[in-house]
Amino acid sequence: MRLLTGLAAVLFCVAGTIHAEDTAPGDAASDSAKATVEFNGETLTLAWEDKDVFGDTIKEFIPADQTLDNWTRLAAAFEYPKIDDPREFAEGMVEQLTKDNPKTEYELLVNSESGEVILDFVAYPEDGSYAEFDVFQYRKKDGGGLVAYQYALRAYGDAKEQFVTALDAEHRAKLIVALVEGAAKIREQATEGESETAATETE
């Protein structure tokens, strides 16, 4: 059941349903503490974060001049402390995606040695207002639990068709590399933050 709950959180993010119109006051990242991360050569700014009663967390980063209603690039980091099987989680997401839309195009890559999983797919909202390409990385977290990272691109209106057409194998591969590199930077920042916190506590 926790797997399904976690999947729902990820799918809500992909579909754009957990954003400004649905968030309660205080859910959006505060102006005084907006972190940034580098993805695909661009600085993205923390726009939203949350933590539920199960300890699952999410942080979403978008360009500073965009909003959670009209972004064109988004990176996100998730933590699921009660889940520890990246492949099972990713396969569950694929099952839900194809159930909602049997025509969903996706690719699932599994590293048999590390257990790390990469999932990419094209998604559309029910109203067809945009096209979205998502790539996720799922991996076990040191000390237990699962971490997931997302990099997503969107195109709206008349730009949708060209956007989807351009998502050939080479382009998708480059976006996967951008995700992997960006995710590594997020982990590096988190490690530095934990080190600084530990140093402060020992002073």
Image (cartoon, rainbow, N blue to C red):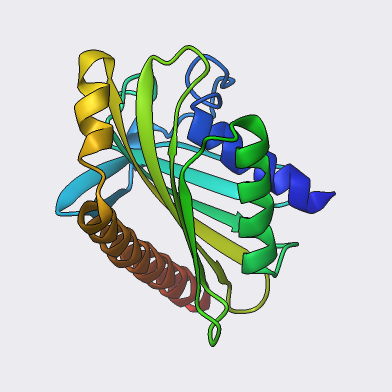
Q: Does residue 171 sit above or below 34 in this rendering?
A: below
Q: Is residue 2 toward the left or the right of residue 168 in the image?
A: right
Q: Where is residue 198 drawn, in percent x and y? A: 49, 74
Q: Residue placed at 51% from the left, 38% from the top?
A: 104
Q: Does residue 37 sit above or below 116 in this rendering?
A: above
What is the quadrant of residue 72 in the picture?
A: top left
Residue at the bottom extreme of this rendering: 113
Of 129 and 13, nearer the camera is 129
**Can the viewer see residue 67 in this picture?**
yes
Q: Does residue 109 sit above or below 107 in this rendering?
A: below
Q: Is residue 187 toward the left or the right of residue 98 in the image?
A: left
Q: Where is residue 31 drawn, in percent x and y? A: 34, 31
Number of numbered labels in the structure image: 0
Residue at the left extreme of this rendering: 41
Q: Where is residue 33 drawn, in percent x and y? A: 36, 42
**Can the viewer see residue 66 in this picture?**
no
Q: Residue placed at 64% from the left, 31% from the top?
A: 100
Q: Where is residue 136 drawn, in percent x and y? A: 46, 55
Of 192 and 85, nearer the camera is 85
Q: Is residue 192 toward the left or the right of residue 111 in the image?
A: left
Q: Residue placed at 52% from the left, 58% from the top?
A: 148
Q: Is residue 163 toward the left or the right of residue 67 in the image?
A: left
Q: Residue placed at 36% from the left, 27% from the top?
A: 131
